Image (tube, rainbow, N blue to C red):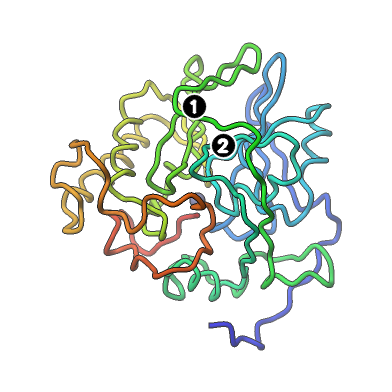
Amino acid sequence: MTDTPTVPALPPVADADSWYEVAADRPGLTLIIERFVDDFLQANLWLVQGDDRAILIDCGLGIVPLAPLVQRLTGAECPVVLSHGHLDHAGAAHEFRERWGHPDDEPRSERRISLLTADHAADLGLRDGELGTTGDWLISRIPGQCYDPRAYLQRPAPLTRRLLDGDRIQLGGTVLEVLHLPGHTPGSLALFDRDRGELYSGDVVYDDELLDSLPESDAAAYCRSLQRLRELPVERVLPGHGAAFGRDRLHEIIDDYVSAMAQAPSAASSDPASSGPASSGPASSGPASSGPASSGPASSGPASSGPASSGPASSAV
Ligand SMILES: [Zn+2]
């Protein structure tokens, strides 16, 4: 539904610098978030600085320019690594000269996406309220008086480096292993710092209901990806949304998902450990999988396709 003339207008942000909140996590690791974005779309942007270079993992909606802030923090341009192509992770990618990600999630085309909550839910094939948010808008400020949040634009950002499973990103003193973990999207990636036991998980895993019912999601593949993660010596998860968590919680989330998957009537197999081509997801392929606003029939609510674990959806895209 787009017939909402009574939706209250949003106030402009007082100063653009206030859009981003920057917090040190540990030496060499900085968390950036977009302060005026609803939890559903508020992604964690992880700035990882090694001895030789830095990378930014995900880049948010890009409503306010991000690259100048990152350059101020690092003293140089740095690549952005896209955990996947959704707007809340890849929206500012066009600002960066180097854009790395998996080819199955390349944000190649322009997408106009409404940030009106009701519109956005409809675009994702969810019912009103299923985003787990109560506000009319998915942002609470606009960058200027003329900004129309119904006309948010995700700009094309072709990859300059294709990351594949097993690739290693050398930062100097820090090495990140690339894990291709499809399910949430076909090209979802996580980066694993094996020396520290730290996993940058994007939307593969976070501490909330895992979103596997988007048109491009594949619940069976998701299940296999999570089982793969369970075998890794992860000590700390730095997710794409919400707070960091440890190994025990990671295993709980995975076990909950896998057991729900095994019980779901739509599961591809009653034995989630079985391999083979994924078949239960509504659409597991297709080159341009990156936009949650892609149209097409909704896959149904979280209840039907996903082993979603915990009540009404409040997770992220
Ligand atoms: Zn996502």
Three-letter code, disc 2? Gly
Q: Residue furthest left?
A: 270
**Residue at position x 53%, y 52% in the image:** 290
Do callouts 1 and 2 mark residues in contact (Cβ within 8 Å)? no
Number of dots carrying numbers: 2
The residue carrying pointer 2 sits among few (fewer than 14), some (14 to 19) or many (20 or more) residues within 10 Å by Cα, namely many
**Residue at position x 81%, y 34% in the image:** 71
**Res 101 label:** 2
Give the spatial CA distance, label 1 vs label 2.
10 Å
Report whether 112 appears left or right of 314. Answer: right
Q: Is residue 107 placed above or below 79 in the rendered structure?
A: below
Name the spot of residue 272 as percent of width and height, x first: 19, 41
Three-letter code, disc 1? Val
Would residue 27 be seen by someone viewing this image from the given angle? yes
**Residue at position x 41%, y 60% in the image:** 215
Q: Nearer the viewer, residue 37 or 105?
A: 105
The mark closer to the camera, 1 or 2, is: 2
Would residue 209 be seen by someone viewing this image from the given angle? no
Q: Is residue 122 placed above or below 66 in the rendered structure?
A: below
Q: Is residue 136 placed above or below 77 in the rendered structure?
A: below
User: Mark 1 — residue?
Assistant: 178
Q: Residue furthest top?
A: 173
Question: Mark 1: which secondary structure?
Answer: strand
Name the spot of residue 56 as percent of width and height, x first: 66, 34
